[in-house]
Amino acid sequence: MRGQQKMRFQFTAMGLACATLLAGCGGGGGGTGDTGMAQSVSFLFPGGMKIARPPEVATVTLKATASSGGPITYVSNTPGTCTVNGATLTLVKAGECSVNANQAGGDGYAAATARHLFVIPKNEQGIRGFTNPGTQPVGATVQVAPASTAGSLTDFPVSITTSSPTVCSVNGTTLTMLADGLCLVTASQAGNDFFNAVSLTKTIPVGAAEGPALNFASGYKPTDSWRTAEAGKIEAYSSSSAQNVVAADGGTFNFHMDVRSDTPDFGGYYGLRFYAAGMEALTPGADTITGVRIDSQKAIKFDLMMNPEMIAAQKTQLRVWLYLGHYANNCNVVLEKFMTPVFMSPVQGVQEQSIDLKSFTVSNSCDLPELDVWNELQNYPIAKLEFNVPDINNKVPTAGTDVYTTSVTMGKISFK
């Protein structure tokens, strides 16, 4: 894609250059021919749109003007991918589209032409319903039947293959587990003139084998205390003064807030949001396609420590939200779990916590009916995590003060 963008810039620059020159750049003589006064054609770049999803048709209104004020005629040089009718450009299929804006000359002006060549990109398609059945014993058979959601009138066929034939075999949509190991199964869907090809691989542990771990946050950036080591953005909120500190080795992220006993209502809230690698925000108005995709992983694991006063006040309930890439009805689907973390002595530092992914419930269904948690986790990435506490410490003050501190230290976050 980077190569295509570079080529688009080069040809666009050429088209703009042609618009400022004399007759030429593909334009023929007209009117008084080469002896006429020079004119230029200013032609707005018509590219940037994807090919439409059938049966819709994408069109672009071409806009060009000549310095002479004469009429403009548009011509497609690639009628197989784009056609012109008057000033309307119709995108026929994905590929390169070349279109000219011509001014024939006359009335003392030489002919002039401006040209644009650009790429019409295809639409992305997705594979849904290809869920990981989890660890299987040797000899087991499993049925898989993924479906296309390409958006075309007829779903494209999906083929199933394996890249680990000594561990598992494939016959149509039936998988047979042959030996201990990781069964790598891929669902593939061909593309066409309107959609890109797509594939999705699942890793199924067989026998004694274990699936791989997926890091969401392997640590934190000491040089940017609001970033994970994977460059995911971190956000925090609270009802009172708060600050964050990243350990010098990047291993932990600490966030705490202080509330004084004379504070009105003497209460509050706080929470932390962690985005997946390289992310700043969820994709507005559409599915978010980046993030951690759950495969054979069974649980979310995270290192956590709360301050001793919070533990003494027994305000240790934690709420975890998983924001999925699934977007509908102006919102993203969110999964929720309340849990009481396992605590040892605070001097031992962060302790690993674990939540079974299938124990999450749907917190925000975006008005979609009967969502299945495991299907959602298999079909859409986890793009953002949020940890928050329903209560703060308002019972046990910091020794010798009237300040009540609520503090949490986060370590590594992963899925296993």
Image (cartoon, grey):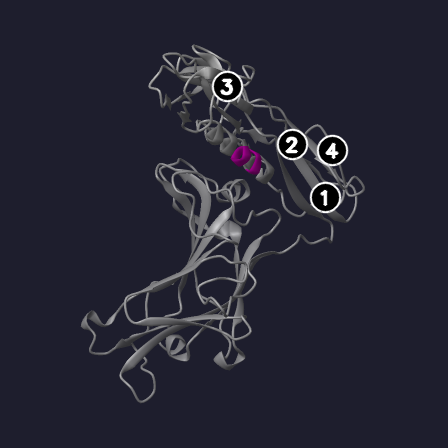
The C terminus sits in image quarter = bottom right
Earlier along the polypeptide chain: callout 4 or callout 3? 3
- For label 1, the residue is 183
Residue 22 in sight from this viewpoint:
yes
- For label 2, the residue is 188
Q: Main secondary structure of the magenta part?
A: helix
Span highlighted in magenta in the image: 6-10
In front of the other: 232 or 101: 101
* Mark 4 vs mark 1, CA separation in Å: 10 Å
Earlier along the polypeptide chain: callout 4 or callout 1? 4
Q: Are marks 4 and 1 in contact (CB under 8 Å)?
A: no
Q: Residue 153 carries which label?
A: 3
Based on the picture, tell me whether residue 50 belongs to the magenta stretch: no
**Circle 2: element type:** strand
**Between tags 3 and 1, which lies in front?**
3
Three-letter code, disc 1: Cys
Q: Residue 170 carries which label?
A: 4
* Mark 3 vs mark 1, CA separation in Å: 33 Å
**Between tags 4 and 3, which lies in front?**
3
**Between tags 4 and 2, which lies in front?**
2
